[in-house]
Amino acid sequence: MKRRDFIRVMGGGIALAATAGGMSACSTRYPDAVLEAWNGPDDALGLPMWAVAYAILAPSSHNRQPWLVDLRESNSISLHVDRERMLPMTDPWFRQITVSQGAFIESLLIALKERGVAPQLQLFPEGEFAPREVDDRPVARIIWESRSATLAKDSLFPQLLRRQTAKVAYDTARPVAESVLEQLRSAVAGFEVGFGGTVSADRVAPLRSLCLDAAKVEINTGRTIMESTRLMRIGPEEISRHRDGISINELVPRIADALGAFDRSQPPAEGSVGYNKAIERFEQHSLSAMGFVWLTTASARHLAVGSSRSAEVNAGRAYIRLQLKATELGLQMHPMSQAPQEFEEMKPHYDHLHQLLLGRPAAEETIQMFCRIGYCENQQHSPRRSLKDFVKT
Ligand SMILES: Cc1cc2nc3c(=O)[nH]c(=O)nc-3n(C[C@H](O)[C@H](O)[C@H](O)COP(=O)(O)O)c2cc1C
């Protein structure tokens, strides 16, 4: 598509005059190759790879997909953090990266059970990482023996290919019933992870505002907004090249980027197209939240016995079950991780969130996941890298 066919730039604003032919070339659909994983694996794949193909569909912060598997031992999968894929500015203690490991592990277990094996999970088989560190030792080792036709399958398996995090406004005319919270709670029983939720207007209102205020801190802090900015993949070429991060395929940012009006080399200036877009996105997400759910861990106790990292992994395992359950119920769930982030500038909101939800400080009980819930149309899935890229050689 030729630029002059559809772009007019007037006084810093962008006006679009798309021709019908030009528009189809500008489809917002991601390239097929990056969505391939969502078709499910080929049944001819060996069991470990088949299960990994489901696990890479797990959610991860900024869609970093920070997972590396070692398949060299038979009937065994070891999981390591891909340390090239961490988010040190917004996730300085690597907590969210650890939670993302849990989401991968639980998906792997669900998939293995589907194929009739009884996987045994050992977390941190060579010892647990220090509370604020990540190293190259395995996060988990999963082993199994022979298959058995009688083993119980996991009822959430069908949702693995359907689950998604829709990053659009929810329908504010459609409330979430209180009873949904109990159905969600049932999905995380047995994980030693606390569950909380609300759909009542008087609790939702301050949480909506808090989400937005916290997002503004992330946007106005140079190093944290730059971390996200560097992970933006704008347009089909960048999306295909990276297959991770924050995929943006809408027409206006693509045009702005093509014209050099979307400067990604520095934090967006207040009032710029990039800045206003970011604020607008967070407003839509925060202010259309129809309820919130959260997962917590007993941090003081875990710290005392050296199990902080296992607790975070278990929170990730619980989180994906919660989101899979939501998928089963036709409900959307979207993490709003700004207020629970640990970087210094966020501290007032971090403390406020813990007070609002738990009435006690994070040192006693930590919020691991904090998500809005509501209803909207399903969106397209997010990209995944190719399966072989996750295998440690
Ligand atoms: C620990 C964790 C934190 C997350 N925090 C956010 C967040 O703050 N904002 C957001 O839009 N998505 C967040 N997500 C969702 C991811 O962006 C999403 O899983 C990823 O883009 C892949 O998309 P999918 O879930 O649709 O497959 C988070 C996911 C995890 C596991």
Image (cartoon, grey):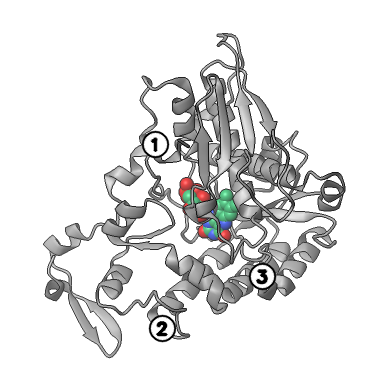
Q: Nearer the viewer, mark 1 or mark 3?
A: 1
Q: Residue 210: which disc?
A: 3
**Label 1 packing within 10 angstroms: few (<14), some (14-19), many (20+):** few
Residue drawn 53% across the image and 40% down it: 327
- Residue 388: mark: 1
Placement of the N terminus among the 4 image quadrants: bottom left
Left or right: 385 with respect to 304? Answer: left
Count of numbered badges drawn on the protein? 3
Q: Are marks 2 and 3 in contact (CB under 8 Å)?
A: no
The three-letter code of the residue at mark 2 reads Ser
Nearer to us: label 2 or label 3: 2
Q: Residue at x 40, y 45 (%)?
A: 384
Residue shown at the point (45%, 84%) measured from the top left: 269
In space, the residues marked 1 and 3 are separated at their CA atoms by 40 Å
Q: Is residue 247 above or below residue 146?
A: below
Figure quadrant of residue 75: top right
Residue for point 78% across, 39% down: 192
Which residue is identified by label 2? Answer: 272
Image quadrant assignment for residue 326: top right
Residue 356 x %, y %: 77, 64
First-in-chain label (2 vs 3): 3
